[in-house]
Image (cartoon, rainbow, N blue to C red):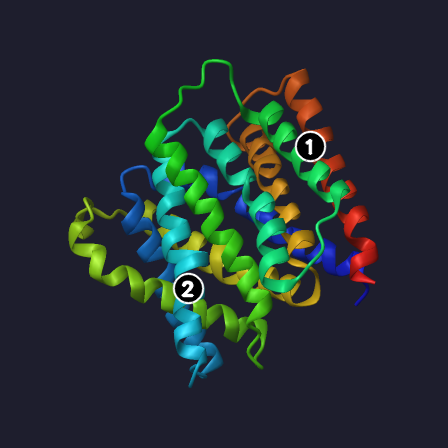
Amino acid sequence: MSRPLDLALTAIAPIIWGSSYIVTTQLLANLDPLTISFLRALPAGLFLLCLVRQLPNGHWIPKMFVLGALNFAVFWSLLFFAAFRLPGGVAAIMGALQPFVVIFAARGLLGTPIKALSVFAVFMGVLGVGLLILTPDAEIDMLGVVAGVLGSSSMAFGTVLSRKWQPPVSALTFTAWQLTAGGLLLVPFIPIATTELSSITGLNVIGLVYLGLIGAGLTYVIWLRGIRLLQPSAVSILGFLSPLSATLLGWLILNETLNWMQALGMVVVLASVLIGQYALRSAAR
């Protein structure tokens, strides 16, 4: 498969992730971040393990727990915490910082050169996300901001290490191992979760199944495949498509309004993704 097709396929993952904003607010508003993260990760991971019927061994076991923590347990817990503490626009800005961390983490861990044009593309992406969903009356909560920055950094390092540590298995098996490890790491913290499991409703189950199987299982298979074939920096900048997708879905499904500033933000986000891929094309060759 050619590089443009690999990029197009990988872009499906953040586009689907954009729907998680609607699912969380409409179907999971009564659940706490820790419960959502646990019920999203472990059931999906165990289901995929039943499909692949293969467990990690040797040095891959501790590495899977590190990746499971970075990509799922820590990232999701902090992500949902930030989402509950911050307005959607501010939370998205925190998430948009991830490509910055990936660029410098890839330099330190993989030796990938830092290109000025790719850094500029990330600046453009953050600006586009701000135009897209940041409102003038958005309030700043410092705990939410810290959680958002730490969550973005967690997945950024998880993205780079997923390229550095490549087990000789399929992307589906790699995803199953990480999801299961991430879910297991959250088990000891379930007793301190504020949600009573008996209060989970049918709508909650629908939302969790979607986030687990589609928003995690399917999308991370696509995402990890992209990390294997492409540079982490090229993959991470595709994450800007997630808030763009969330905005469009809010307009289509929740009848939210779109103004000229949001339209401009969409153009800037798309331009940042294209410029970022252009900047990295020579390194990929």
**Foreground residue, 169 or 146?**
146
Residue that carries the numbered disc 1 in the rendered image: 124
**Foreground residue, 187 or 206?**
187
Spatial CA distance of label 2 from label 1 is: 30 Å
Q: In the rendered structure, which disc, 2 or 1, sits on the residue that comes first in sequence?
A: 2
The amino acid on which the numbered mark 2 sits, given as a three-letter code, is: Gly
Q: Which of the 4 image quadrants contains residue 121?
A: top right
Residue visible at 71% across and 23% down?
264
Q: Is residue 187 above or below residue 136?
A: below
The local secondary structure at tag 1 comes to helix
Q: Position of residue 112 (x, y in %)?
A: 69, 59
Residue visible at 63% across and 56% down?
107
Q: Is residue 94 above or below residue 65?
A: above
Q: Position of residue 175 (x, y in %)?
A: 50, 68
Residue furthest to the top in view is 137
Q: Position of residue 138 (x, y in %)?
A: 44, 19
* Quadrant for the C terminus in the image: bottom right
The amino acid on which the numbered mark 1 sits, given as a three-letter code, is: Met
* Quadrant for the N terminus in the image: bottom right
**Left or right relative to 55: residue 18:** right
**Circle number at residue 250:** none
Residue visible at 60% across and 66% down?
163
Q: Is residue 59 above or below residue 73?
A: below
**Left or right relative to 121: residue 70:** left
Disc 2: CA contacts within 10 A as few (<14), some (14-19) or many (>=20): many
**Foreground residue, 274 or 266?**
274
Q: Which of the 4 image quadrants contains residue 261?
A: top right
Residue that carries the numbered disc 2 in the rendered image: 68
**Foreground residue, 225 or 196?**
225
